[in-house]
Image (cartoon, grey):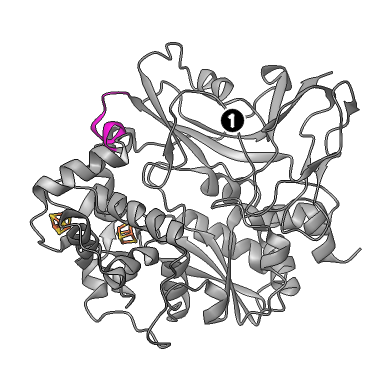
Amino acid sequence: MDLLERIKDAGVIGAGGAGFPTHVKLASKADYILMNAAECEPLSRADQAIMAQHPDELVKGFKIAKDVANADHGIIGIKGSHPELIQLIRERITANGLDGDMEVGILPDIYPAGDEHVIVHELTGRVVPETAIPIAAGCIVINAETSYNCYRASEGKPVTEKFCSVVGDVPNRFTALVPVGTPVETMLKMAGVTDFSNIGVIDGGPMMGRPMKEIGGSVKKNSKAYVVLKKDHRHFRRKSISLEAARRVDKTSCEQCRMCTDLCPRHLLGHNLQPHMSMRVMNYNLKSIQLKETAQLCSSCGLCEYFSCPIGLYPKSANDVLKAELMEQGVKYKPTKTEFKALAMRPNRLIPSKRLIARLGLTPFNKPAPFIEIPESEIPEVKIMIRQNVGAAPEVIVAVGDHVEAGQMIGKIPEGKLSAPIHASISGTVTDISPEYITIRRG
Ligand code: SF4
Ligand code: SF4
């Protein structure tokens, strides 16, 4: 079986984003393949743990991905704020005889350094056009853990484990490699949470993560972190606001200062994204489709909403509303040019991670989340989400009562569809299959 087939069979998907199937991404020919080891979201520590724990698998997996994509250059993007990891990865590149294949590229400690468009520009100087993905600029971007999973796939090992952190306002912050499907509640208990009544949990990072309405669900192949805050923490309250409430606040207060636009990472790359215009459209109920369309260029990084706006308004949410409206109408933004150039003032408008963390009120929690080993007995049951990838849900191929071995495929790619298979992450018995989850009891 060739390497691309192995990666496909192993169910490798983007380990840090929406979960795009990696075998599809690597099927393009690229000039550059870039590893996103930026650990972009505040407080998150999973990528740092992979680099520290598995540097050899990481660089070998990146070489495999580079070969599969037939890329000319490989660059591993790590923030300059992690000199010890930069040194370690450079040593392991040399020790594995990969100096001719890849190098470490130093990223600034800014948010959002891991945004695909931003990392392409920082590491190659190129600009990905509006509405396009990095391959339009000759680049493929994969996450650090995706590289690690490509290595494991080459050894015939499917994706059954996930590096994940529990951070924030908890007694014991930690990062661990846990079976896919580990219940979120189990993760929180391991962090020392005993009273669930007053905590809010963000699934993902503080910026792009989703505030959980109720604590449930389980670790997915693209989970990175669970951020725990008190329910009345300002950032948790802001993240939990409904679109309708955000719209009401926006309408009464926007002063069109355009700070949201001036600091927008995509605007700074020369894209025609102007969140202050989205606010104007919303506030004055403007009908112009052209003014609305630019909202579709928004990456939802959240910088305008949680950092830039001096009076705490919700321009990202305005974009979300407009995007939903346009999707319903079947309207798609069409770029009016093909060449894009970053704005000259961009270097002076980058937002240091530390300033962002302070603005979010998270400085007291910006502390290490040490890597720990978790005994099997702590995770007696897993709930494996069926649809974890972009595209079609895999087709379930087990039944309640079946005994499955760890690594066994339990959901396959439907014929002719963009999808990724799922595998049992522990050995045991299938005890339940719902439209969303397959539950396996260890033993
Ligand atoms: S949303 Fe905030 S930053 Fe943007 S224009 Fe309005 S007041 Fe200024
Ligand atoms: S969320 Fe705001 S800052 Fe981020 S890309 Fe969208 S408009 Fe720009």
Q: Residue at x 45, y 72 (%)?
A: 131
Residue with the mark numbered 1:
372
Counting from the top left corner in percent of width and height, residue 66 is at: 69, 72
Q: Nearer the viewer, residue 151 or 230?
A: 230
Whether 236 is among the magenta residues is yes
Name the amino acid, label 1: Ile
Q: With respect to residue 247, does 37 lie above or below?
A: below
Q: Is mark 1 within 8 Å of ligand 2?
A: no
Q: Residue 295 appears at what percent x and percent y?
A: 33, 63
Q: Is residue 107 above or below residue 139?
A: above
Task: Please identify the dominant SS of the magenta region.
Answer: helix
Binning the other alpha carbons within 10 Å of mark 1 as few (below 14), some (14 to 19) or many (20 upward) gives few
Q: Quadrant of the N terminus?
A: bottom right
**Measuring 48% from the left and 65% from the top, which residue is drawn there?**
116
Ligand 1 is found in which quarter of the picture?
bottom left
Q: Residue at x 20, y 57 (%)?
A: 285
Q: Is residue 165 left or right of residue 362?
A: right
Image quadrant of residue 401?
top right
- Give coordinates of residue 119: x percent, y percent: 45, 68
Q: Nearer the viewer, residue 166 or 270?
A: 270
| Viewer can see residue 300 | no
Within the image, what quadrant is residue 150 found in? bottom right
Q: Which residues are magenta?
A: 231-238
Image location (x, y in percent) of residue 209: 43, 42
Q: Secondary structure at mark 1?
A: loop
Is any atom of residue 325 visible in this view?
yes
Q: Quadrant of the C terminus?
A: top right
Quadrant in which residue 234 is drawn? top left
